[in-house]
Amino acid sequence: MRPMLMGRAGALAGAGALAAASLACRRHEPARQDCLRLEAPQAPVGFDVTFSIAAKLDCPDLQGGRVAWLQVEGPALRELEPARGGFELTARVPPLADVVGAPVPWGVVPLSPRTRGEVVLQATWTDDRGHTLARQARVAAAHRARGLPNTPVGVRVHLGGEGWHVSARPAGSTAVLDTAGGVASLLPDVAGDWRLADGGGRALALRSGRYDETPLDCGRAGCHAGITDAVVTSPMTTVLARLLDGGGEGGGPHPPLQTSRDGGAQAKPALPHAMDARPPGQDYPGCALACHATGEPGARDGGFAHVVSELGAAGDLGRRWQALPRDLHRLGGVGCLACHGPGAIPEASARWSVLRADVCAVCHDAPPRYGHVAAWRRTAMARADANPRARNEPACARCHTTAGFLATVSTPERQPVDRRTPDGVGPVGISCSACHAVHDPKRPQAGRGLLRDTPVPAMLAGTAANVCLPCHTPDAADARPSASAAAVWLGRGGLDPATGAPLTGAPLHAGITGGCVGCHRGGPSDVERGAGHGFRAPASVCAPCHGPALITSDVRARAGELWRRLRKQEPPAPAHADATVNVDRRTPLGRAAWNVLLVLEDRGAGAHNARYARALLDAAASVIEAGDGRETR
Amino acid sequence: MTCDRSRRIGARALLAAATTASVLGISSCRSPARAPDGEGDCADVETLRVCWSGTGSPRVVKRPVPASAPAPAMGWRCVGGGAARTCVSRAASAPAFACEGSRCEQRHPRMPDDGEWQCTDSAGATVCMGGERAAGVAPAPAPSQPSDAGWFCGHRRGGDPGSRVCVDLSPDFPDGRARGWRCRTLHDGPARRVCERDAAAHTLAEACDPAHPCVDGSRCAEGWCVPERPAPSCWLETDCPGGRCRFGSCITGGA
């Protein structure tokens, strides 16, 4: 019978179906299933290249038959060709750009579990006697990459751009640039400094190193002592220690990271000291090492998994944390190098790259299980700096770029280096590190989420701090109000047109637990965790108090009408970006215009605080309708 | 002396402990004998056990090691005395040496704790200096104590605040014996301990007599070269005004 090639599972189509091999735990199958063995590439195969998998029958009583293949996860493979009754399969990984699903950025290309071209193929063997065996194999195109210029030895670096060549390399290196699918890549083989240049002469400095040779002396006096203090109790620092010792994430039980030997779900946490000694990579903590420790499993990078293999018997993970050797302590957990990379601090001109969400995406972009980054990428925040003006003008950059925001909320004495995004790398957006301070010296005991402690805008003085406030509150000194959601929500920012006195209102929703994200927690439904990073506020969040009926409000429509009446033109969209829109708050009409713009700048004004929005508009209308004309001083 | 009592205890608890011991390669040893001068003044020195009197006079006593199993290739790493004594196969907590010819290399060598250390070897002892805390590492339960038991530690004289010196008088050797090896720790790239065969190398725990003096910083006691009581405080000679820095401790008197 001709081997059957089953189609790719439609329900799992798309990048959203991809899960990280290192994040996914392998299922223990009954021994009989071991009769079918798949010989698949263990190392990354590359993009736009062909690979093959062989299916072998290891039990003498099973002969012949045929093997059918099904791709169950990952980007659609090309040129799938079964041969020898399906006992051999060849397939082609899509090109990098197709897997990433976006233009490949210049320089070091970040790769997450979602974008590293990982696929899962299932082989199902059957014979004429009714026997059936099924096994799965994982193949990935590449290791994950943070997109930083300091990169581990043994992990291939993919380069966006054209015409790359190596102009300087470390002594002893024999690595050469490869090109596949139009993308150049380099596998650093020794530690040291590399100089590369693209066809246009634009230079890129790389620093390669092993994780275990990188000093962890960041906490020296005069360097990052405060940060080092802060991370001692960070859940990221201690995650592996807690898991090995029986605690779970956030102190609770760890989610079921593995399945039991018989393939059934295992309800209790899978902890190694309660298990027999299975080699890492087959069970927990092997399945968690990719994100609960430093380094890339499978790479010879001096990371946790690599050092475990080098330690031999001393690397046995079937013990409690404290019994592990020193080097495993230093690499266990999500420490400095897990995000900042090995080797050395990048050159100043490259430090912008650590602000990319891609650094976090190495673990948090693994849908459907970890969908934080996938959810965020669908938001306007991910594209906040797509407009060059928003990216480059200081007044805009403070809330349209991560670097600008961090500079704004930093204290004057701790201004970070210039980390503006260079041209050619695409939008960085308001990324993870804007809202999450994973090592904030001011908040060493920060709770789950590690949210940044930001100053309260002057307009909202006296209210509780919230990381959203600085960019969703107008500056009273601005010529026109900018994004005003937080001000409207808290009933602040308005002006009495007649007197210029503050016009305040009751903060009707200020008591909602969690503040902004108490409502703005909606996101894609196809991810298990992190959907809240879609920041949508679905109507369902209002239902517990307001009932199932959809809440509608006419405040913005009314604001638009007032603006047209006042300025004889359509409302600006958005007003804060229109330099022609100015209001003179020394006049009643100017103050009325300010109030109208406050409502127009908050697309959710009707939900945030409809009563206050109406009060602003009522006050504005009293002047506009009385004057019924243009602003006068 | 062997761990006779340990064997009896081990036999009673064999079933309960068998799984863990076999997985970890650990064998416990509880010495039936107490050290003569108090447990805190004794140390394993290579294959010897040395105790120091109140005046600092060393005495060599028998070193209890598990007798229930053949000695592991790198030997036992034992700490403590009396009921608190434990021995662990060195291979359970440090990787084996990889040898090529007369040169052996151990990756990921022992260091006192998770901090930043710079180590060197001196006549069969390993001395490490530094100890600045490692950033982004889960804290040890007792940060002031070396997490790798077996080290003696102290503050470095004249060093940076927080700088420490630690000495391991019984470090790892390829065959479990210090004699015949000259070792050093390399810090270029991943830290590793390199030992090279050197029949002329003199170490602690060598046999001694008037014709065969001990290396500087040790003395001949009961026919064995043993160090002075460890009081780690120095890394360089200049850390010991008027004295010498040997095995991490400042000593006075003639060489």
Image: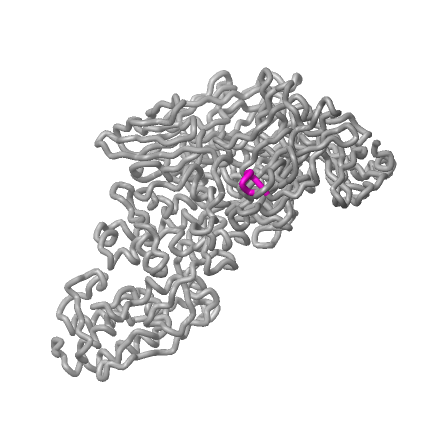
Specify the quadrant that holds the C terminus of chain B: top right
Q: Is residue B171 left or right of residue A38?
A: right
Q: Is residue A583 visible?
A: yes
Is B238 part of what is drawn in magenta? yes
Q: Is residue B166 left or right of residue A567?
A: right
Compare residues A619 and B101 and report the one nearer the observer.
Answer: B101
Residue found 47% across the figure and 56% down from its top:
A450
Compare residues A376 and A420 and report the one nearer the observer.
Answer: A420
Q: Quadrant of residue B31?
A: top right
Residue A247 coordinates in the image, percent (x, y): 63, 50
Q: Quadrant of residue A166?
A: top left
Residue found 44% across the figure and 51% down from its top:
A224
Residue found 34% across the figure and 73% down from its top:
A610
Compare residues A267 and A583 and report the one nearer the observer.
Answer: A583
Residue A281 coordinates in the image, percent (x, y): 57, 34
- As displayed, is residue A538 above or below residue A58? below
Span highlighted in magenta in the image: B234-239
Residue B60 coordinates in the image, percent (x, y): 78, 34
Residue A76 coordinates in the image, percent (x, y): 40, 33
Is B23 part of what is drawn in magenta? no
The color scheme shown is one colour
- As displayed, is residue A607 above or below residue A141? below
Residue found 36% across the figure and 61% down from its top:
A411
Compare residues A426 and A607 and report the one nearer the observer.
Answer: A426
